[in-house]
């Protein structure tokens, strides 16, 4: 388990990794960072939200990140970022607004008009940077 509401299987699940036979298992160091993101960001959000939140993407190995066209500096490859959704743009906006007002984070990103929300947390430095990807 990564946390109370996130299993390891959910955190490393990737149809692309399965299709391309890419190993997407985190190292012990990355696993600890994933647990920190869950503790500091996901679990407080889930407690407030009171219902399931789908994890779209959490950890991505370097090979998987390249295969999906991720940024070369993606925090997903370090286990420091999670993409999630409440199931609709309206719910994602609520999630985004709550995170912005209540959490410490490195980056909070509204991706494609609330199609999903990206939130990252750094063990060493959190910038509370709010971004929009259109």
Image (cartoon, grey):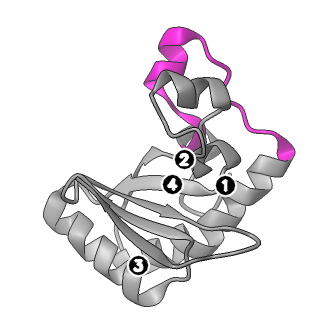
Q: Nearer the viewer, residue 107 or 101?
A: 107
* Marks 1 and 4, how far apart at CA: 12 Å
Q: Residue 47 at x, y = what percent?
A: 46, 78
Disc on the earlier residue, 4 or 3? 4
Q: Which residue is mark 3?
A: 99
Q: Which mark is residue 58?
A: 2
Residue span colored magenta: 11-28
Q: Which mark is residue 2?
A: 1
* Marks 2 and 4, how far apart at CA: 4 Å
Element assignment for label 1: loop
Q: Nearer the viewer, residue 104 or 86?
A: 104
Q: Nearer the viewer, residue 1 or 31?
A: 31
Q: Are marks 1 and 3 in contact (CB under 8 Å)?
A: no
Q: Is residue 25 magenta?
A: yes
Q: In the image, 102: left or right of 28?
A: left
Q: Which residue is mark 4?
A: 82
Residue 122 lies in what quarter of the image? bottom right
Query: Which numbered mark, 2 or 1, is in the foreground of this view?
Result: 2
């Amino acid at each position: 388990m990564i946390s109370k509401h996130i299993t390891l299987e959910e955190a490393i699940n990737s149809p692309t990794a399965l299709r391309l036979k890419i190993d997407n298992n985190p190292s012990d160091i990355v696993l600890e960072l994933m647990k920190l993101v869950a503790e500091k960001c996901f679990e407080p959000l889930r407690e407030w939200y009171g219902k399931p939140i789908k994890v779209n993407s959490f950890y991505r190995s370097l090979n998987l990140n390249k295969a999906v066209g991720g940024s070369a500096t993606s925090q997903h490859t370090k286990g420091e970022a999670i993409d999630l959704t409440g199931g609709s743009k309206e719910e994602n906006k609520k999630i985004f607004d709550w995170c912005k007002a209540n959490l410490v984070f490195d980056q909070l990103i509204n991706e494609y008009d609330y199609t999903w929300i990206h939130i990252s947390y750094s063990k060493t430095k959190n910038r509370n940077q709010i971004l929009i990807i259109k």
